Structure formats: structure tokens, C-alpha cells
Image: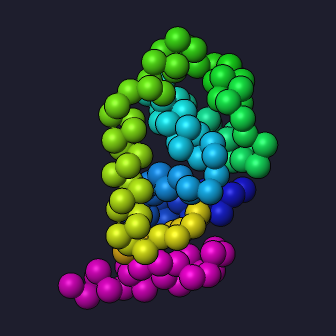
Amino acid sequence: MPLLEQVLEKYPQQVKLVFKNFPLGNHRFARPAAAAALAAGEQGRFWEYHDKLFEIHNRLNEGSFLKIAGEVGLDIPSFEAARKKPEIAALINRDLQEGKMAGVRGTPTIFVNGRRLQQRSLDGFSRVIEREIERSEKK
């Protein structure tokens, strides 16, 4: 089971996952991939599409986006229209700016209550989450 799923399973009431786009400038298909995933999200298939993108991240090409859309059962004309929406481009730009302001330099970067997670393991997450839970209970 992927690490983030383990964390969400261990802390179902205490943890909320927030995903932000941070397409890397040195990856030719990063921004189109982000737009495609958000377009898939309009049909309720963001995570399914996202996961398939990451499975082939180093082999992406323009044809990959439609192929994955078909694999996850998207309505292709709606998907294609959504990919081009200015609102999707604006959301990606906003996420990218927020990431830059937070000091993000690469992906994935994980924060827990605004603190960058250094140790990406279940134990690492647990230590930080338990500390944050304890801190919030003291308030």
C-alpha cells in the first residue's frame, strides 16, 4: 500500500491530504500532465488518472494523455475541452506560485501543518503527526 494511503488509514480523523500541482520546468510534459489530471478530476477521476501518469512519468508524450483518459473511462470530448480551460491553467499557476513561496524545489515535497517532512516513511509521518496532535491538544 502506498505511503500516503497508510498515513490516511492510520489517522483517518486527524489527517487531511491536500494536493498541489508543482509541474517541474525541466519536464516538457509536466504542465500538460497537470492539466490532464485536473481535467480528469472534473469527471471524478483525478487520483486514478494521476496515478497512471506517475507510472509512466518518464515516458510521457502527447498521446499518453488520451490513452490514459480512455483507460480510466473518461468522456474524451469533455476531457479535451477541460484540459484547455483557462481556469485549469490558472489553478496550476496558483499552485506553482504557492509552492515556490513555501520553498518547494522538487516533487514530491510533503508538508505537515506547514512543516516540511524530512523523513518520508510511516514512522517519519507518525512522529510529526503525533507531535502536531499533541501541540493542538495543548491549545
Q: In the depicted view, which residue is nearer to us: 18 or 12?
A: 18
Chosen colour scheme:
rainbow
Relative side of 119 to 55, left or right: left
Q: Quadrant of residue 9?
A: bottom right
Q: Quadrant of residue 100?
A: bottom left
Q: Which residues are magenta?
A: 115-139
Relative side of 53 to 39, left or right: right
Q: Residue at x 73, y 40 (%)?
A: 60
Q: Residue at x 56, y 57 (%)?
A: 24
**Main SS class of the magenta portion in the image:** helix
- 25 inside magenta stretch: no
111 to 138, vertically: above or below:
above
Q: Residue at x 54, y 33 (%)?
A: 36
Look at the image and tell me in which quarter the N terminus lies.
Answer: bottom right
29 to 24, vertically: above or below:
above
Residue 15 percent location from the top left of the image? 43, 63
Residue 102 percent location from the top left of the image? 38, 72
Can residue 22 be seen?
yes
Residue 14 percent location from the top left of the image? 40, 66
Count of numbered badges drawn on the protein: 0
Can residue 44 be seen?
no
Q: Residue furthest left?
A: 139
Q: In the depicted view, which residue is nearer to us: 137 or 125?
A: 125
78 to 114, vertically: above or below:
above
Look at the image and tell me in which quarter the C terminus lies.
Answer: bottom left
Q: Residue at x 53, y 52 (%)?
A: 23
